[in-house]
Amino acid sequence: MPRLFPKWSDTLFRLALVGGVLTAAAMVVGPMIYMRTPYNENRNFPVDQPVQFDHRHHVRDDGIDCRYCHDGVERSPYAGVPSTEVCMGCHNQVWPKSVMLEPVRRSYFSGEPLEWNRVHRVPDFVYFNHSVHIKVGVGCVTCHGRVDQMALDFQVAPLTMGWCLGCHRDPASRLRPPDQVTSMTWKPTPAWRAQAKKVAAGLDRKLLTSCTACHR
């Protein structure tokens, strides 16, 4: 009986079958991989600001505490961004005529606030309270990274649910003394590691890992 299809059609069918399987697998695995990439999580991409604000100069060189500019971090869910008056509190004497500070001066005299571009953002359905974390001893560097080494601020932590739960399930390794929460270079000592475990033991682990802790 003569062949209905040429011999090469068998090879073509096998290639099409393998290609279909690989395509189906890629459609499932591809989005899962992409969701974990810095591109989707918006990590490691410097964010431009209306003023050329250099954290390295302010934090590392001048030793300005995070709370001086982000003054809501200890008493509010929101850390806050510095008002123009805060900036001018220093810069009416330091570099008062600098070209880079023209947007600050214009904002100060016009009364129009500076519109800072947000760097770290969680979805609207996620509740995050800065003051709660600061009070128990979670350092700024834990979530925001070494801002003292950043010319332009950028997100370093993935801020995913899995990343947050990892901290909530093992808070001891992320805690530090209250007077060191803003330090960029603090390292835990053996004595503090033991103390941190005691502090973590006093936290309600069930509450920390419940859905309502973040989704309210």
Image (tube, helix red, strand yellow):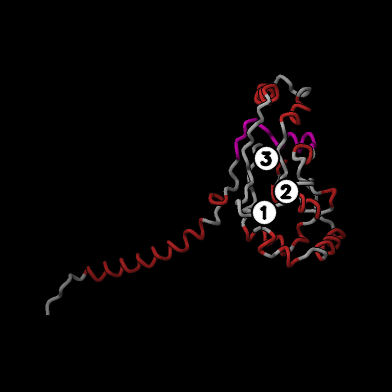
Taking the spot 69% from the left edge, 23% from the top edge, the residue there is 105
Question: Which circle's residue, 1 or 3, is located before the other in the chain?
Answer: 1
Label 2 and label 1: CA atoms lie apart by 9 Å
Main secondary structure found in the magenta portion? loop
Which residue is more in the foreground, 68 or 148? Answer: 68
Say what secondary structure mark 2 lies in.
loop
Mark nearer the viewer, 3 or 2: 2
Residue type pointed to by label 3: Met
Q: Residue furthest top?
A: 97
According to the picture, the residue beneath numbered tag 2 turns out to be 77
Closer to the camera in the image, 200 or 214: 214
- Label number found at residue 150: 3
Residue type highlighted by circle 1: Tyr
Q: Which mark is residue 78?
A: none
How far apart in space, not on screen, are marks 1 and 3 (Cα)?
Answer: 27 Å
Q: Position of residue 143 (x, y in %)?
A: 69, 50
